[in-house]
Image (spheres, rainbow, N blue to C red):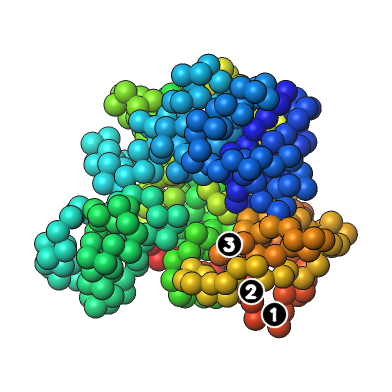
Amino acid sequence: MNVLVIGSGGREHSMVKKLKESKHVDKLYAAPGNGGICQDAQCVPIKDDQIEELAAFAKETDIDWTIVGPENPLAAGIVNAFEKEQLQIFGPAQEAAIIEGSKDFAKGFMDKYGIPTAAYQTFTDADQAKSYIRDQGAPIVIKADGLAAGKGVVVAETLEQALVAVDDMLMENEFGNAGSRIVVEEFLEGKEFSLMAFVNGSQVYPMIPARDHKRAHEGDRGPNTGGMGAYAPIPELDAAVVESAISDILKPAAAGMAAENRSFSGVLYAGLIETPEGPKVIEFNARMGDPETQVVLPLLENDLLQVIIDVKAGKDPHLTWKEAACIGTVVASAGYPGAYEKSKPLPALNGAEEEGCFVIHAGTKQEGDQFVSAGGRVLLAGSLQKDQQAAQEAVYSFLKRFDGNEDFFYRRDIGFADKTEKA
């Protein structure tokens, strides 16, 4: 089959690498791809939001399956557009992608269907939001309602930080239309984990849980990012907590979306936090997580394309997982998630396989025979090993090539279990 992956980040590179293993894949394309993806698939210079052009390319090239990575084209209705042209595509329709596209919708939906989550209020007026925050006190969480590339969340530990976040979003338009409405949430403390599932209507096929590290710096300090690294499985996560998340969160969410005439088909991602009352939802995403995908897919025994075909056909894909551990650490541009410079040369990345590692490109492009930076999160160095410690050692040995390079940074504590995340 001819397969097209839409997107240009680390998640998409990980998907491309997994699809390359498939016995069903003949020709693999990516639009627009990145420097590393172009080593594994034929990259096509069409942006992920150019829906008409992508559909035309899929028709011209006889694409059998299109798989959507990022959230923006899903929210813009790429699945609806492809299906209207009778093109096979994997991902939720626009009406279902709203579970990620609007945090206000997601919170109201969870309320309606009894899905555990933090208490909240939604605001468009800054003064009303500030009054509510003063009543609630800090710490407290402020979120842009719409899509903000994983950066529209402020965990305010003081009242002053919370009030500044309100002004930044509602008054200063920091996140554009995405921040024209904000959700103010109760602060929850505990350990976060991510649970993704292949979903088709009310059918839910969970993947193994992963834990990512959102804060920019060691010890879970600094601003929230799109994710600085992840590991799977999570040895310290009780199996009963995972079962509760499946039965009390994922399955009711899939059933609820179907009941709302927003039936979900694709990958549903639940960002969760362990609390004394059980797991609660921090956020839903309408696609695979990044960087969780980079550590979950290497553990999947199944052929990814076969899984997608089965799920869309209403069949159980019978997911099976390797008895191993996978860890990935993100290398980011200096300054990320704030302002950063691009086109910084990367050190040589050869020798990863010999060191028991793999490299997933996110924000890179190739100039001549060298890779240079083209984004905030530049790449992920990962390792699949018999246990977590062996994977950590391999990753951090490989990353020594970035030491002393002031253009890049990475966290040195990814995969260490004694961290308490705050959400």
- The residue indicated by pointer 2 is 408
Quarter of the figure that contains the C terminus? bottom left
Amino acid on which the number 1 mark rests in the picture: Asn
Q: Which tag is nearer the camera, tag 3 or tag 1?
A: 3
Asked if the residue under mark 1 is in contact with the one under mark 2, i.e. CB atoms within 8 Å, the reply is yes
**334 or 129: which is nearer to us?**
334
Q: Residues within 10 Å of mark 1 (few under 14, many from 20)?
A: few
How far apart marks 2 and 3 lie (CA) works out to: 11 Å
How far apart marks 2 and 1 lie (CA) works out to: 6 Å
Secondary structure type for disc 2: strand
- The residue indicated by pointer 1 is 405
Residue at x 61% of width, y 26% of height: 58
How far apart marks 3 and 1 lie (CA) works out to: 17 Å
Residue at x 58% of width, y 75% of height: 334
Residue at x 39% of width, y 25% of height: 263
Q: Position of residue 153 (x, y in %)?
A: 36, 61
**116 or 243: which is nearer to us?**
116
